[in-house]
Amino acid sequence: MSDKRHNIDVDFFRQLDRFTFMVKKRVSTAYAGSRRSIHSGRGLDTIGYREYNRGDELKSVDWKAYARSERLYVRQFEEDKSLTTHILLDSSKSMDYTAGAAPSKFEYATMLAAGFAYLVTKDNDKFAISTFAEDVDITKPRRGRKYLLNTIERLETARVGGKTAIDECTILYGKAIHSRSLVIIISDFLQDPKEIESAIYRFSGHDLILVQVLDRTESTLTIHGHSRLIDLESGVKLDTYISEDLKSEYQEKLTEHINHIKDTCSRVGAEFYTFTTDTPIFDAFFHTISRRRW
């Protein structure tokens, strides 16, 4: 496993503050501020109803509404209006890859995760950043700047290693989510498409965002000629000659893989974004946040 430190510059958050000001309310009210998922409270007025989601408390179900419609609805109250944000960060060995001056995929993904958490913290709402590879390190959602700083410190020393078991890890993490939430998964998503598809459907009852992070050499296969390829997760080495035909075939397969993820996300109403690590981090933020409909 990699023990190197993943530095998140303090200036990153100063720039993020300026960034949120630039895009005004579309950003400053994002991620839990304006997209409210209102849960049951006690002693407060009912302000509406929504369909029952797995994990909702049965005591909040309106059985009279069920008798009329034969559909489960839960009462919405003014209390507890925040939408908890769960950020799943891929820390498998493949995320340690970088081929040039750009940050590694894990470092780039960590900045994205910390940025999303920062936006949630500005609204004083709960979040959790959990890393996953062969297993998932589940952290409990909390709120506050102190918790954010502790989370960043933990991410800076996080170990990167192991294979990716996205299907098994999302099964485990799904059991830790007890109400409708915002779930953000950040990964290179270079796994079995069936496992990725299962993970997407598993969180389809939530507000779901997938962010794919790739190195430029992975997205366009910039290498050419006699090359040695190494699978970072398995350690398998392959000596081969990378011709223009092979590059074309690779590009076709990658595009097919990405389109499969996009199509699955589209079917469940999830969002999917893909970035290379040479993309300025704030361009990535602007692209994901400003396009959301609040």
Image (tube, rainbow, N blue to C red):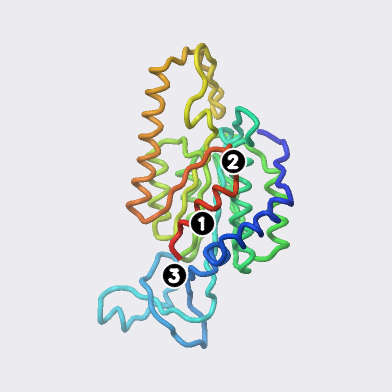
Q: Residue at x 54, y 60 (%)?
A: 85
Quarter of the rendering occupied by the N terminus: top right
Crowd around label 2: few <14 · some 14–19 · many ≥20 (10 Å)? many
Residue type, label 3? Asp
At label 2, which amino acid type do we have?
Ser
Does the residue at mark 3 contact the one at mark 1 (Cβ under 8 Å)? no
Looking at the image, residue 205 sits to the left or right of residue 284; the answer is left
- Foreground mark, 2 or 3, reads 2
- Find out whether the residues at labels 2 and 1 contact each other: C-beta distance under 8 Å: no
Q: Which mark is residue 56?
A: 3
Number of callouts: 3
Q: Is residue 155 left or right of residue 73?
A: right
CB within 8 Å, label 2 to label 3: no
User: Residue, x 47% and y 81% (percent of image)?
Assistant: 77
Whole-number angstrom distance, CA of label 2 to CA of label 3: 30 Å
Among the two numbered marks 2 and 3 on one chain, the one whose residue lies closer to the N terminus: 3
Mark nearest the camera among 3 and 1 is: 1
Residue under pointer 1: 289
Structural crowding at the residue carrying mark 1, measured as other residues with C-alpha within 10 Å and reported as few (<14), some (14–19) or many (≥20):
some
Quarter of the rendering containing residue 28: bottom right
* Nearest to viewer (mark 2 / mark 1): 1
Q: What is the spatial separation of the Cα atoms under label 2 and label 1, in whole angstroms?
A: 24 Å
Q: Secondary structure at mark 2?
A: loop
Tag 1: residue type? Ile
Q: CA distance from mark 3 to mark 1?
A: 28 Å
User: What residue sits 68% from the left and 58% below the top?
Assistant: 148
Q: Secondary structure at mark 3?
A: loop
Tag of residue 91: 2
Q: Judge left or right: residue 149 versus residue 135.
A: right
